[in-house]
Amino acid sequence: MYEEEDLPYESVSDWQFDVPTSGSKRLPPAARYVESLTHQGYGFEAAIADLIDNSIDASAKNVVVSFLRDDDQLVSLLVVDDGCGMHDEALDVAMTVGGQREYSDEALGHFGAGLKAASLSHADALTVISRTKRSPSAGRRWLTAHAQDDFTCDIVDPRYCQDLVDRYDGVIGWHGTIVRWDGIRAFGTITAGQTDRFLNETIERLETHLGLYLHRFLARDDFHIDIVVEDVRTREELDHRGVEPIDPFGYRIPGRAGFPRTYTAPVEGVGALELTAHVWPPKSPLVAYRGIGPLAERQGFYIYRNDRLVQAGGWNGTRSAENHHHLARIAVDLPSQPNRVFSLTVKKDGVNVTPAFARGLEKAEDADGGTFTQYLSEAEQTYRDAARRSTEVQRKEVIPPGKGIDPKLKRTLRDEIPALEGEEPITFRWESLPADVFFDIDREEHIVRLNKEFRQAFNADRRAGSNDAPVLKAMLYLMLEKNFRMGRSSAQRDDEMALWNSVLLTAAQCEMTRGEAAAQ
């Protein structure tokens, strides 16, 4: 006797509201599915951000992105964290194509594909090594070539796993994870002598992307991301930059009185959705306004999911970008519960919405009954009023600061002074110089060399680092930048530098003498 759902299908002309079936069969993915992961369209910065999402979900407090360099070659990239780590079984799930794991409502992970898709979009080999408080170091490796054949995943030798964990014991203590990329395709495109330029441009973009999309986490006292360049043989840090938050709403004074202002939109299927509307001050030089992309693309909605920015601007089909809306930015926090109105893209670089969102905007009001349309009009009027005013004083573009400058100081300099595009940044280095020289410059290579004999005078009892002595370097940058921008030397500029050298040399000697006297 058939149950009702097992009755055989009989042809009828009526519309079938349910599709009749006659059984089921398992169809495992073809091995070429792995190849499709390499063509997901992940940008480099978005891929690294996806890996760091996993670190945040693992309760990491410190994350280090390390570019490994061997002479003039870049050979590997690591993302190291001090999160809770994974044991063998969890590693297997994490490295399984299509592996399933449970995500909490607060997790940044969403689809379970980010680790593999983000990594294999850029690298031919993905290795993950991890340890927990209660389990030893373990690792797995995907080689794209092997995975395409039969989904073979390598088990990493436990001794190597522990060796790599020990190498980064400054980050990993009792627990943590290392994601290693090898065979990075972009590294193979670097021409001879261009490694420094490639690294600087790549790290600059990565700093900006991570600083923006993870700014709420980076603003916390207990979470840090560092980007380093490491000599793979000597383990020397060739560059070290701490990532600073870039708040897309981080102006000092709003562009219009009464803002920011909160509007509530009744969205079908979601309920009351709060929209925090901001009006940026016109003509702002801040990186958070001008330095995160074209202004037309950065107006509109900034959508967050569990404090992680997943869309930085755009109107989601509710209107077109227009110049007079450049000052309008609206923060939206997605509800933690799944819904059918908002859907996150796989790469977490945008949000798709249904027409219910647009209908909710039409009804959105603030506490005083003001409408969202009125907000846009006020933002537009602020822009137009500023455009009619006389042109403000424009600072000349400068060659940007580079390695050796503290990231916070670098950010302030870029906020305050427009940068020349395509110029090699100015690097600061401590080196051996003659005793009667405090500094000299290399115009061709854009380097300021400081006499390392005086380094301790500017660090007192603190450990010297590549970004030390920020006050000294800030003053020298402001004094010397024009000497790189103007090219060949002149008698007047050479005399200026001789004067500065003499005064600073005496000042440094005074600092050394005072330090020695205090130590006695």
Image (spheres, rainbow, N blue to C red):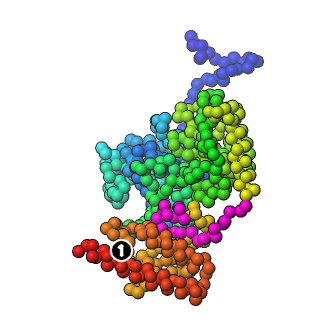
Q: Position of residue 279 (x, y in %)?
A: 64, 47
Residue sitting at 37 percent across and 45 percent down?
A: 84
Q: Nearer the viewer, residue 270 or 144?
A: 270
Quarter occupied by residue 459:
bottom left
Q: Is residue 38 visible?
A: no
Question: Front-most of 2 and 333?
Answer: 333
Which stretch appears magenta? Answer: 390-413
- Magenta span main SS: loop
Question: Which residue is label 1 attached to?
Answer: 457
Measured from the top left, where is residue 55 in percent x and y? Answer: 44, 48
- Asked where in the image residue 92 lies, by quadrant, the reply is top left
Image quadrant containing the N terminus: top right
Q: Is residue 219 left or right of residue 7?
A: left
Counting every numbered tag in the picture gives 1
- Residue type at tag 1: Ala
Q: Is 364 situated above or below 65?
A: above
